[in-house]
Image: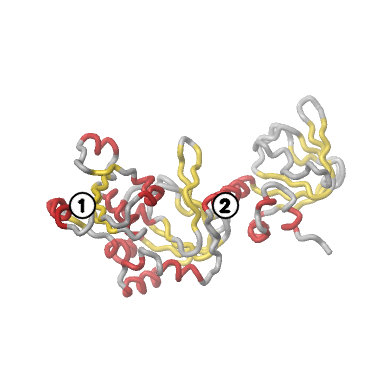
Amino acid sequence: MTTPLSKRLQHFIPFDEWPESIIEELSPHFRLHQLSARKILFKRGQDDDECHFLLEGSIDLADDNFNVNTISADDDDNFMALDSTHSVHRYTGITQAPCNIVSVKRGYLDLISTWSEFCQHTGEQDADDETDWLERLITSELFARIPPANIQKLLSRFEELPAALGDVIVREGEIGEHCFVIKTGSALITRKQNQQDETLAVLNPGDLFGEDALVSQLPRNATVTMTTSGTLARLAKDDFDPLLKKPVLNYLPESKLNTLIDEADTGVIILDVRHSQESNASPMVRARSVSLSTLRETLKTFERDFIYAIVGGGRAEAAAYILSEAGFDARVVT
């Protein structure tokens, strides 16, 4: 009986750490091809956006001094992509015998490897049951604050969109016009940090994203890239503002801030999410300065029993939305 391709690929890094379901998800993007003997697969110095895995046959890897290393498919050290350390080849690959080769975009492997490693590190699971997305969405802390009539309208305003592995749904720095919900599939949230992509979170069915830019009216603060094919639900800003943003945000006139602090049954924490230059120029007494860009990651350090009064204009609205989404009592100081 022929061994399925997904099983054969699990002999190789990085597939050896992936379940077959993930490999099969990637399978439409595999290029399975055959080369006869004495054919060039790649050349030394060539910039190659694909990784190549040798399934059958043998191939010579020749360096610039014409030293040759022969790799056979059944060799114990044939467990990585051929000459895969860098995207620019250090060797010329020439088939010594007829070969069966699987080639796949390097970017896809990097994307799914990052997604897989992040899930293992954080313990996140891929909630890929198509029937779960709506239940997860409407039972979230955020939707508990929305009137039932608004939820019905929201669901009718969502536009369904197909998405493919590697599709960039929102891009850091762009202006936001929509927010999205994952219906099927998964995605990765990344942000540029010192010229490198920093992985922030994994998105699964039922997760809402892209709303921060709609609330704050600031450019997108992260990039979301699909790590599988899937389906999205998209909501336009014109529907988001009255149906989701307005019922979630609570406003507090600055003139009433001291009264709230004095009379509240619990403690009040003032959060200052202004730019650091603005905060330094006119600091607020007793305020805790927090970067809006890292707010989601620092929520685990916040005390849930307190009221959060947030200053910072549009940035304050975005911060209050993030806290409300996570179940905190947040007020925008106006």
Q: Which quarter of the rendering shows the N terminus?
A: bottom right
Q: Residue at x 45, y 52 (%)?
A: 170
Q: Nearer the viewer, residue 250 or 66?
A: 250
Query: Helix, strand, or loop for circle 1?
Result: strand
Say whether residue 174 is left or right of residue 95: left
Residue 8 at x, y percent in the picture: 76, 55
Residue 326, how many percent across, how many down? Answer: 36, 58
Residue 184 in the figure: left or right of residue 311? right
Specify whether residue 80 is in view. yes
Q: Which mark, by number, is residue 120? A: 2
Q: Regarding mark 2 in the picture, which secondary structure is present there?
A: helix
Comparing 124 with 304, the one in front is: 304
Q: Classify residue 288 by image quadrant.
A: top left
> Residue placed at 17% from the left, 52% from the top?
261
Label 1: few (<14), some (14–19) or many (≥20) C-alpha neighbours in 10 Å: many
Identify the residue at image location x=43%, y=46%.
Answer: 172
Q: Amino acid at mark 1?
A: Val
Q: Is residue 161 visible?
A: no
Residue 81 in the image: above or below residue 90: below
Residue at the outermost top position: 65
How many C-alpha atoms fall within 10 Å of the one at disc 2: few (<14), some, or many (≥20)?
few
Q: Quadrant of residue 77?
A: top right
Q: Amino acid at mark 2?
A: Gln
**Of residues 199 and 102, the one drawn nearer to the viewer in this rendering:** 199
Q: Residue at x 19, y 56 (%)?
A: 252
User: Residue 92: where, in percent of width, then height?
Assistant: 76, 34
- According to the picture, the residue beneath numbered tag 1 turns out to be 333
Q: Are marks 2 and 1 in contact (CB under 8 Å)?
A: no
How far apart are the two marked residues, 2 and 1, measured between alpha carbons? 40 Å
